[in-house]
Image: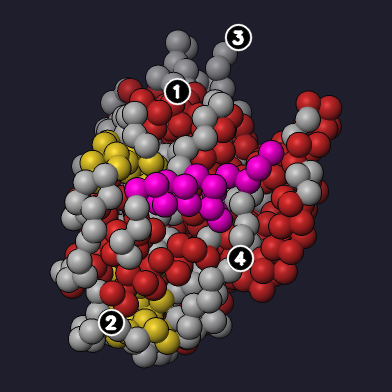
């Protein structure tokens, strides 16, 4: 019996998907003949296909393999970055964009750990997003997949719709209906994606008021625009309130317009290019006049820093505006380190495990800044998480679209968090927050979790260790009761 690649061609005898990439770089053709089946024309359309020059940067060295979550899980070459780039080459040369090929691209988390690891500087982020846009335009999904994606992308990027959903969700939590939904009988018949969405939903509480303009405390050092966001604003408003409190304490006048909603990250990372462009233009319009634009969610910051590339083909002056805007975008930890902190810190004797969100560490290269700010708090001890660079499985809406591998990665991350022996988990992305706490609960552990800005706000505000840990275990945004 012969082994076949995803286009249906036989691989050389003794070759498997897991080993083919270990051959010489020029042999990564997987045994395919030079003339692939098809018309000879590209299987991609002419609108922003994955660029040949960027694909050509990959020399198939294999440094990406141990950093890729799906390759770590399955050992399949086509579920590694270089394997997926090979599939891009295959389709670009005329092979059909079929179900099997699309599945390998869908199974990529887009965590960008491979970008960090790659010695050749392959811009995999641009390649996978361009490829996913092609998939969205040309791949016929099942009706279930279309329905699920339509539900996700008609809800999560829209703050007003999310706020409207808060009422029914709070009632659901208050009535403790989760105990019924999570019973073995219901779980057997409930679709996995719906069960995952229900389990991930954070505890909801009162929404703290954030003014459109918050004055700086003391001498004003910077005027900043702050993105409230969609999921962050609706489900983690306490994180937003803490962020504004810290920025103001550090001498920033904070402009947080209510009309500045989704930045387009969820859409852009899923290949929904038109939606991403529309959200980007609205975000630029809302925040363009300010000295700096501050973000407290890793995925949002990554997307906003890429607006110049996203809007490169839009009519003038959009490319220029987008590029200038992106240059002013800062993660909140990045901005605070640039400014230098001045607000007094009160002691908080607590041991924390700091989780690097992928779109902060890999996509933006921001690792030292959060750790430096946490280390400024007297009494805080930061412990590193084993396999810290491996994605937790959240990856935007990946855990909703690919719940099985996401759950495996979430459990792996949760076990590594527990291995630190820390009292508090700190992370700078709402998706990671929900994913890891849900995985911890699946292992029978409840652990306090907080955003770095919540810890800083507690220190600046003089809160006690007990107040911090209680809020981080049972406050809004934490794991909802079962």
* First along the sequence among labels 3 and 1: 3
User: Residue at point 42% right, 52% down?
Assistant: 467
**Quarter occupied by the N terminus:** top right
* First along the sequence among labels 2 and 3: 3
Q: Position of residue 479 (x, y in %)?
A: 58, 44
Is residue 474 part of the magenta span, yes or no? yes
Nearer to us: label 2 or label 3: 2
Tag 4 and tag 3, C-beta contact below 8 Å: no
Mark 4 lies on residue = 206
**Quarter occupied by the C terminus:** top right
Q: Distance of mark 2 from mark 4, alpha carbons?
A: 25 Å
Residues packed near mark 2 inside 10 Å, few (<14), some (14 to 19) or many (20 plus)? some
Q: Distance of mark 2 from mark 1, alpha carbons?
A: 53 Å
Mark on residue 83? none
Q: Distance of mark 2 from mark 3, alpha carbons?
A: 73 Å
Mark on residue 75? 1
Q: Secondary structure at mark 1?
A: loop
Q: Secondary structure at mark 2?
A: loop
* First along the sequence among labels 2 and 4: 4
User: Residue at point 24% right, 58% down?
Assistant: 346
């Amino acid at each position: 019996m012969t082994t076949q690649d995803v286009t249906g061609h036989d691989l050389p005898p003794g070759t498997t998907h897991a080993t083919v990439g270990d051959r010489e770089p020029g042999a990564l053709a997987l045994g395919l003949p030079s003339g692939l089946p098809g018309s000879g024309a590209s299987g991609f359309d002419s609108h922003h296909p994955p660029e040949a020059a960027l694909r050509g940067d990959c020399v198939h060295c294999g440094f990406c393999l141990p950093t890729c979550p799906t390759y770590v899980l399955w050992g399949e070459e086509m579920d590694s970055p270089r394997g997926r780039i090979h599939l891009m080459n295959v389709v670009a040369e005329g092979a059909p964009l079929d179900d099997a090929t699309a599945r390998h691209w869908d199974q990529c988390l887009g965590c960008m750990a491979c970008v960090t690891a790659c010695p050749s500087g392959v811009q995999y982020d641009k390649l996978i997003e361009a490829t996913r846009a092609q998939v969205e335009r040309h791949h016929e999904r099942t009706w279930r997949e279309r329905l699920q994606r339509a539900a996700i992308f008609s809800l999560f990027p829209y703050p007003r719709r999310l706020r409207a959903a808060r009422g029914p969700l709070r009632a659901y939590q208050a009535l403790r209906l989760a105990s019924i939904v999570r019973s073995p009988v219901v779980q057997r018949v409930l679709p996995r994606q719906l069960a995952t969405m229900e389990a991930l939903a954070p505890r909801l509480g009162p929404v703290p008021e954030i003014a459109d303009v918050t004055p700086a405390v003391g001498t004003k050092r910077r005027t900043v625009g702050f993105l409230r966001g969609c999921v962050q604003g609706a489900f983690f408003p306490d994180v937003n309130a803490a962020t504004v409190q810290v920025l103001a304490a550090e001498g920033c006048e904070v402009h947080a317009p209510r009309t500045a909603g989704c930045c387009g990250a969820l859409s852009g990372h899923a290949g929904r290019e038109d939606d991403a462009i529309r959200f980007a233009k609205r975000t630029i319009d809302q925040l363009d006049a300010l000295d700096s634009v501050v973000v407290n969610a890793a995925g949002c910051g990554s997307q906003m820093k890429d607006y110049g590339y996203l809007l490169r083909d839009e009519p003038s002056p959009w490319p220029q505006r987008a590029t200038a805007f992106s240059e002013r975008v800062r993660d909140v930890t990045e901005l605070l380190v640039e400014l230098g902190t001045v607000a007094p810190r009160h002691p908080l004797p607590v041991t924390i495990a700091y989780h690097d969100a992928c779109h902060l560490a890999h996509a933006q290269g921001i690792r030292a800044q959060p750790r430096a700010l946490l280390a400024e708090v007297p009494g805080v001890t930061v412990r590193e998480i084993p396999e810290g660079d491996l994605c937790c499985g959240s990856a935007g809406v990946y855990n909703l679209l690919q719940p099985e591998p996401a759950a495996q990665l979430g459990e792996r991350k949760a076990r590594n968090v527990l291995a630190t022996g820390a009292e508090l988990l700190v992370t700078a992305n709402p998706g990671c927050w929900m994913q890891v706490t849900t995985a911890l609960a699946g292992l029978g552990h409840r652990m306090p979790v907080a955003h770095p800005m919540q810890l800083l706000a507690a220190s600046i505000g003089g809160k006690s260790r007990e107040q911090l840990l209680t809020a981080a275990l049972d406050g809004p945004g934490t794991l909802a009761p079962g």
